[in-house]
Amino acid sequence: MFKFVQHFHKNLFSKSNLTHHKSLLLLAWPMILSNITVPLLGLVDTAVIGHLDNSFYLAGVAIGSMVISLIFWLSGFLRMSTTGLAAHAFGAQDKLEQMAVLKKGLILSFGFSIFLLCLQPLITYILQNHITASNEALEQAQIYFSIRILSAPAALANLVLLGWMLGMQYAKGPFYLLLVANITNIVLDVILVVWLDFAVAGAAWASVASDYISLIFGLMIVTKLLNKHGLSWSKTFIQPLTHIQETLSLNRDIFIRSLFLQICFAFITYYGGRLGDNVLAANAILLNFLLLVSFALDGVAYAVEAKVGEAKGQQNLKQLKLWVNISLFWGVLFSILYSLGFAVFGDELIALLTDIPEVIATAQNYVIWSVLLPMIAVFCFIFDGVFIGLTRAKDMRNAMIVSSIFGFFGVFLLLESWGNHALWAAMSSFMLLRGLTLIKRYHDLKRTGQLI
């Protein structure tokens, strides 16, 4: 065992591979920093709306933004598929395909955004008739949603631009794009809600405007990147329509995978509500801990998507395996640091997020799961990135379905008598099984020579 570790360390940290570590971190750090701006925006939204004279304004924005977040989060397949396909084309130095991936992604994003806009009456009906809240809160939620959904074409196009820039190994682009979007949103929040007193409608219009402003900014960045790589928007428009069925299948499988993931997280909130307001509030705090973990692990995962995709495009199996090992090293390191941080400062972090004694006491009863989860979940984060880079969305989909049915709901039903501990045990086993199934599939592909 000692010889294996020594051999692993020697190969992973050889002088020639130190540049690979640096290259991965240069891709990961901008995404980690941009991830941190997202909850900052949420805090500002909460602050400006929370200072209006009635609580139903804040409740309405919470409901409306939850629906919008779910819709746009499920649209994340556009970002993932674009990253993987662009990375392949980048590795193969196929300029026509690099352009084709970008245009196909934008065409798909526009088509899907029109579909979402057509669904607006149905979603509004569900909002009004199947969400439990006061009439005033539901009215504000409807106002927020009806305005916010107008940003769908820009928000979904931004996902494609972000994914394409990552695939082209330009991590600063997504960082600038998200930074502009969030800063613009914050500034417009203050102007429209605080100064002009547009209330919930102001918060919604601020988000819509920031999405379109960031789209214009993103197109400027991408155009500059196109010129750098000798590409142009004027390339033939027929090229993006080739292999469209493959792209649609890839996006379909990632969408199904994301849907099952969201169902598991939604069940945490749904069942936690049945256990009482204190448990619901405590779980919300602990889910924020998991969000903190995702800042670093998603950053590494985004980087490995691009690096593995590039290696596959180059047909370089040795490089592909090296990127997987390097990303695992950094992912495990970050997860250990998070676990240690939650173990030492967990109670203090809970107290920062709430000052309600009952909620603090409840959250402290379950904080042990936050200590364990980073080390349990690290492998599913990293291997999600690996499989996106390989564009093997069907394997991701299958792993997610199995993990959801058996790892989450199966474990929850077995341990339901444990109450809220059953929920967190189910989430932990779900994350663990996702990682294990993807690891097994990766080694099966490696053994049978199907990675490249």
Image (cartoon, grey):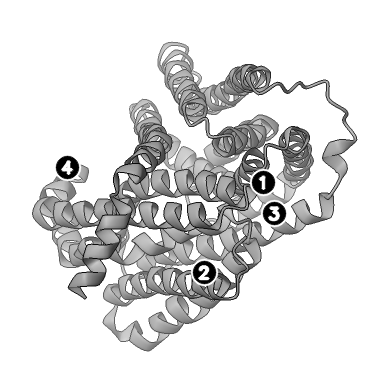
Q: Name the residue under label 2.
A: 442
Location of residue 339 by image quarter: bottom left
Quarter assignment of residue 19: top left
Q: How far apart are marks 3 and 2 (CA)?
A: 20 Å
Residue 424 location (% of width, % of height)? 31, 70
The outermost residue toward the right is: 238
The residue beneath circle 4 is 352
Residue farthest to the bottom, as pictured:
414
Gap in angstroms between the C-alphas marked 2 and 4: 41 Å
Do labels 3 and 1 touch, CB within 8 Å? Answer: no
Q: Name the residue under label 1.
A: 85
* Residue identifier under label 3: 251
Badge 3, how many Cα within 10 Å: few under 14, some, many 20+? many
Residue 123 locus on image (x, y percent): 67, 50
Residue 123 visible at all: yes
Q: How crowded is mark 4: few (under 14 residues within 10 Å), some or many (20 or more)?
A: few
Which circle, 3 or 2, is nearer the viewer?
2
Cα–Cα span, label 3 and label 4: 39 Å
Near mark 1 (Cα within 10 A), the count class, few <14, some 14-19 or many ≥20, is many
Quote the CA–CA distance across marks 1 and 4: 42 Å
Name the residue located 47 percent from the left edge and 38 percent from the top edge. 61
Say which label, 3 or 4, has the lower sequence index.
3
**346 and 108: which one is in front?**
108
Question: Callout 4: helix, strand or loop?
Answer: helix
Amino acid at dot 3 = Asn
